[in-house]
Image (cartoon, helix red, strand yellow):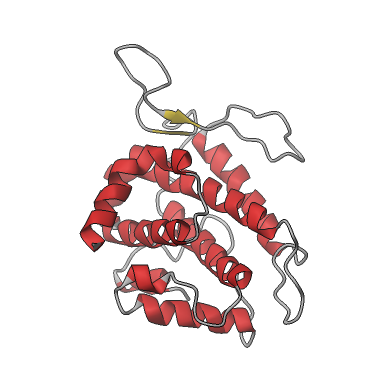
């Protein structure tokens, strides 16, 4: 159980419901011990320190463990607001309102889905459909033992970092959509503190290891700067 899950359950949130099945790291494995270490350091309240690579640990393994944890966190957070994110309310997957003055798409970020395998040409779809595609795709990557090996001694593939970066880039889009389109609902559910803590942890982690291009973070740049300045 992640620290976020404990927070949500203690607050009486409905978030025991997840959007997709939770991805578990096998108990007794080294990755499980790393996850416990991460949760213990998160409890200290110093998120900048908590995301740092523990001394003597493998960078790929640390990124793998945290990527699984972020998937589970976003899975829970989005699971709380699925009833508000519908084909009608969110007919396109976007982050930010459409500009009413010039009717251009420069004032908001719109995402089209492609996974390079099943859907090779990017398609325009609703937010719930996009997020379903996205979370299913991430789940498939995490379940692939050749990409995310859970057994001791099994090496990470050469393309692991590239895959992890793509996963995190796409998970960011779910945060961006929730903040821009559903923050009122998050506040009604009194879950803004959980969302902010999770996102701050996510951002500090990707910044620590330079995992997402700055341009991709543009939809939430103001919030990112605010969270960073509070921590200085």
Image point 77% across, 76% down: which residue? 154
**In the rendering, at what x and y percent does residue 146 appear?**
78, 64
- Residue 64 or 75: which is nearer the viewer? 64
- Residue 223 or 113: which is nearer the viewer? 223
| Res. 39 visible in picture | yes
- Residue 37 or 159: which is nearer the viewer? 159
Image point 31% across, 68% down: which residue? 12
Locate residue 72 relative to residue 96 in the image: left or right: right
Image point 58% across, 81% down: which residue? 32
Compared with residue 58, is residue 16 higher up or lower down, i.e. above or below?
Answer: above
Farthest residue to the top: give it: 102
| Res. 9 visible in picture | no
Q: Where is residue 24, by image quadrant? A: bottom right
Locate residue 148 relative to residue 174 in the image: left or right: right
Image point 69% across, 59% down: which residue? 160
**In the rendering, at what x and y percent does residue 3 appear?**
40, 74
- The image quadrant where one finds the C terminus is bottom left
Compared with residue 228, is residue 128 higher up or lower down, i.e. above or below?
Answer: above
Q: Where is residue 15, by image quadrant? A: bottom left
Q: Where is residue 98, by image quadrant? A: top left
Compared with residue 173, is residue 66 higher up or lower down, i.e. above or below?
Answer: below
**In the rendering, at what x and y percent does residue 223 appear?**
29, 46
**In the rendering, at what x and y percent does residue 7 appear?**
34, 71
């Amino acid at each position: 159980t992640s620290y976020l899950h404990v927070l949500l359950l203690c607050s009486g949130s409905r978030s025991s419901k997840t959007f997709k099945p939770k991805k578990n790291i096998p108990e007794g494995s080294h990755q499980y011990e790393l996850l416990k270490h991460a949760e213990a350091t998160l409890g200290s309240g110093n998120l900048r320190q908590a995301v740092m690579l523990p001394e003597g640990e493998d960078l790929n393994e640390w990124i793998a463990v945290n990527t699984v944890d972020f998937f589970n966190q976003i899975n829970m957070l989005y699971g709380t607001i699925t009833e508000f994110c519908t084909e009608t309310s969110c007919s396109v997957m976007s982050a930010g309102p459409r500009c009413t003055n010039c009717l251009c798409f420069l004032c908001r970020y719109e995402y089209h889905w492609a996974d390079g395998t099943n859907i090779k040409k990017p398609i325009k779809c609703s937010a719930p459909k996009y997020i379903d595609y996205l979370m299913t795709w991430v789940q498939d990557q995490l379940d692939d033992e050749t990409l995310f090996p859970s057994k001791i001694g099994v090496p990470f593939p050469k393309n692991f970092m590239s895959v992890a970066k793509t996963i995190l880039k796409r998970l960011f889009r779910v945060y961006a959509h929730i903040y821009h389109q559903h923050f009122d609902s998050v506040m009604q559910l009194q879950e803004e503190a959980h969302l902010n803590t999770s996102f701050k942890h996510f951002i500090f982690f990707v910044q620590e290891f330079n995992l997402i291009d700055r341009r991709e973070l543009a939809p939430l740049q103001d919030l990112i700067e605010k969270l960073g300045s509070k921590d200085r």
